[in-house]
Amino acid sequence: MKSYRKLSKEELTALKNELEHQYVDAKGKGLQLNMARGKPSVAQLDMTMDIMDTFNSNSILKTEAGDDCRNYGVMEGIPEARKLMGDLMGVASENVIVCGNASLSIMYDTVSRSMTHGVLGSTPWCKLEKVKFLCPVPGYDRHFAITEHFGIEMINIPMSESGPDMDMVEELVNKDASVKGIWCVPKYSNPQGVSYSDDTVKRFAGLKPAAADFRIFWDNAYIAHHLYEDKQTEILEILGECAKRGNEDMVYEFCSTSKISFAGAGIAAIASSKANLAEMKKSMTIQTIGYDKINQLRHVQYFKNVDGIRAQMKKQADILRPKFEAVLNVLEEDLTGLEIGTWVKPIGGYFIAFDSMEGCAKSIVAKCKEAGVTLTGAGATYPYKKDPNDSSIRIAPSFPTPEEMKEATDIFVLCVKLASVEKLLTECK
Amino acid sequence: MKSYRKLSKEELTALKNELEHQYVDAKGKGLQLNMARGKPSVAQLDMTMDIMDTFNSNSILKTEAGDDCRNYGVMEGIPEARKLMGDLMGVASENVIVCGNASLSIMYDTVSRSMTHGVLGSTPWCKLEKVKFLCPVPGYDRHFAITEHFGIEMINIPMSESGPDMDMVEELVNKDASVKGIWCVPKYSNPQGVSYSDDTVKRFAGLKPAAADFRIFWDNAYIAHHLYEDKQTEILEILGECAKRGNEDMVYEFCSTSKISFAGAGIAAIASSKANLAEMKKSMTIQTIGYDKINQLRHVQYFKNVDGIRAQMKKQADILRPKFEAVLNVLEEDLTGLEIGTWVKPIGGYFIAFDSMEGCAKSIVAKCKEAGVTLTGAGATYPYKKDPNDSSIRIAPSFPTPEEMKEATDIFVLCVKLASVEKLLTECK
């Protein structure tokens, strides 16, 4: 296909007219499709329904250590759940605390605790003039929402195919003591599906932070979320890499079964050094009477071990893959060569990241919306919802069917074309 | 029985010798009994095991509004759970948010949010020179732990049989703008089993706080926890009383099913004004992807309605009552007339509060411990664990059997006697 960038003003005008007709037709279809959030589909959730048979009124709800899961206590999570989540993350049980149903809450609580109580004896962040977090972009909107909520200044760090720009990360972390954290989704990142290279992980582990209370927030949300059996990425285990370099307290790793069992009723965990976990437990003892141990035991008995999780994820991939491919096929067929957008072809995770021409993302999302296709808001993947180039769009293919995804992507590419032509025409003036 | 206070030095010395022999015998029994925490017993937990049959792999896990409980969303809790917990508290669903398994976490999060973000636009408490909370004493140690954790100054408020000393509460709340909250357990209080009189509730509702961000933390933990069918207390509904007086934003009410279904895996709720809940939801949207809705639905389908909860609590009372009575009988038989201790005879809740002679509580608890009977630490029911009179002891009869409770109380009264005699002898010198 001929690049839009090589079209004359007349050609662009004619094309715009043609696209506008198509857009009117598209709107006429009255579609109602949502590609906005990374929600598991009903078919994925149905796959885990057997977990509801795990217990009945005759079940013995005791941990292997003999504690009654129905009663108070066992703050750090039941031993077998700590092992399961530890095995998933590749760390020892003793480095794991299993909490409630949302890793987001553990992240929030961790930032909140740092604000009010500091980190391992440091000044509480709320007492400091300035606290900064580094934010690889595009990234996960809810990470940025936490730091914004606490008035933490966010600094964009560009992403490449091997992870965040580590020159910039090292420069900022090692020199600026007000930099207290960085948000990372190291595997099948949200939204690009990028996995950090071994070199990137090693450079993270080797940081020499100016601030003793600097922490890496390592959100391993897509740890087992491969789309292909024969194309899988494994990243280096960060706790071990940090420990090797004498940096064992520098990282908090998070993961959950939200996209393994149930998005609303899974279990979530944090992995970190013993010192960090001991500090966390001090607050937890005050914050809660313990998390839901019955649900922890339910998960352990259902999945049995990490292979059980992997088997489940293989079945989930069979549901997700066609949806991703439906989107990618349309993008490839309709946009290749037009020079109006680029995208990463992910092999895991929950998203496809699309980069439009500069200044077009908002217009594309708005046009899609008008035609009944809801996308994540343009800019949402940037701190303060401000995408400096207005070009990043996140597509979440998990919830609709493959057919709906194709239909939605047809609308999407039409809107990309239309917005791009409009933009190119403006530039002709 | 003759009052110990009327005994001569010689009589006391002889008595001490006799009691010491008994104590040696008691220690020889090698008992291992725990009356320290208000944990439901295995029999109580067994009673709710049918809840595990509520769902199986064929269940439809949708709310009445059609939302899938297995997926993300419905931040404020599912409508039917909001109704159930609202009915329990006597407030409308719209005034209720249902969260995870611990009301303690809602309280902690509420204080934490006030620290970092203030209350309905007020200055964040962490930015203030001084923040104070009023603490009716004796009270719940975990309440005091939260305020201590955040560096909030705690002021003791004496309790009477009708609730906290309201003259003192009014004086402090209405005149001192640094007083931002008060911890209340208004019904079958922890540890005294006292219920606030109508007059007390009305005076609470009619407070005219110097601080606009003053809030009553109304922990209705024992809302349905009657011990007797024919002797039950009902307190006035606080939200309504506050609203009548134009004070609708002044109260947060908390309750949970921790001591109704499972202590480790129940559901918890907050009731408050729409403005307060809206503010809370703003933070929750950032803190979590929603609480465990499957467990909320499980509870609703199991209990069906508030009458289902009441029926369950009647059965639980049948288990708890003999334990309370075992303790009270021993206290009455062995201590009446000795003038070395007083106690309240509760008709609900989870505790019996015992007041020893001044300066004896620590000694009694230590002696019990040595004889294999673990009590809540002396002073634990006071802010900073400091009981100014060293006289308050909390007895938690729920976990052991009635027979064990009798045995433990036998040891307890022996230790009370011994500590009292030792004290009286010191005073003879």
Image (cartoon, coloured by chain):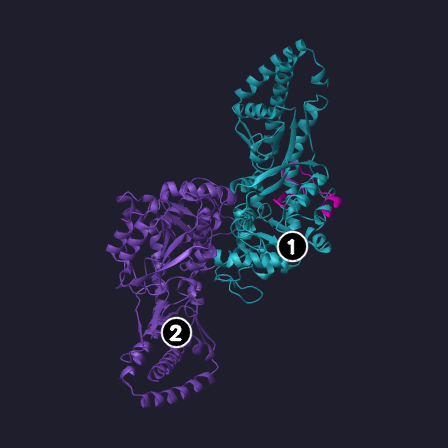
Chain colours: A purple, B cyan
State the residue at coordinates (32%, 88%).
A9
Q: Which mark is residue B249?
A: 1
Magenta run includes residue B191: yes
The front one of A405 and A261 is A405
| Kind of residue sitting beneath label 1 | Asp
The front one of A9 and B340 is A9
Residue B135 placement: quadrant: top right
x and y, in percent, of residue A73 in the image: 49, 41
Query: Is label 1 in a helix, a strand or a loop?
Result: helix
Q: Which residue is mark 2?
A: A361
Disc 2 chain ID:
A
| Kind of residue sitting beneath label 2 | Ala
Q: In the image, A73: left or right of B338?
A: left
- In magenta, the rendered stretch is B177-202
Disc 1 chain ID:
B
Q: Is residue B205 visible?
A: yes
